[in-house]
Amino acid sequence: MTRILLVEDDELNRDMLMRRLERKGMEVEIAVDGREAIEKSTQGCFDMVLMDISLPVMDGYEATRAIRAQERTQNLPIIGLSAHAMVGDREKALQAGCDDYDTKPVDLPRLLAKINTLLAVEVQK
């Protein structure tokens, strides 16, 4: 079963996305800020992180860089999620270490395609 760490501070977004992913057969664990994302990603065994960019305590960019800096999680696939769809937001997420980027509200088929693509790449490594 695919294990996802969902990093999202907004309760409605978090609950909606968690339920939708679980219905697709994924196991989802939650972190509500960047610092908790770092702690959980290094302590748990996840296949992927879905990282909200706008977070309290530590934003998603900084949390992604911290996850990438640790040997155990440096190759963990991370998809940045943000309600911001401005020019340059995707590039900024990729520069921080995200493998991909998607906008909110989440288009589930598009997000699932990105998840499946990244997980397939990880299997081939």
Image: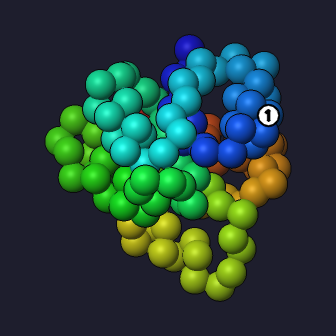
x then y, percent, for residue 88: 58, 83
Q: Nearer the viewer, residue 18 or 107?
A: 18
- Given the image, on which type of amino acid does mark 1 rest? Met
Residue beneath disc 1: 16
Q: Nearer the viewer, residue 71 or 58?
A: 58
Query: What residue appears at the point 59 percent right and 18 percent down from the top-left corner?
Result: 27
Q: Quadrant of residue 104?
A: bottom right
- Secondary structure category for the residue under label 1: helix
How many residues crowd around disc 1 within 10 Å: few (fewer than 14), some, or many (20 or more)?
few
Query: What residue appears at the point 53 percent right and 39 percent down from the top-left corner?
Result: 32
x then y, percent, for residue 45: 37, 22
Q: Residue furthest left?
A: 71
x then y, percent, for residue 125: 34, 39
Q: Nearer the viewer, residue 70 or 31?
A: 31
97 sits to left or right of 60: left
x then y, percent, for residue 123: 42, 32
104 sits to left or right of 8: right
Q: Is residue 125 visible?
A: no
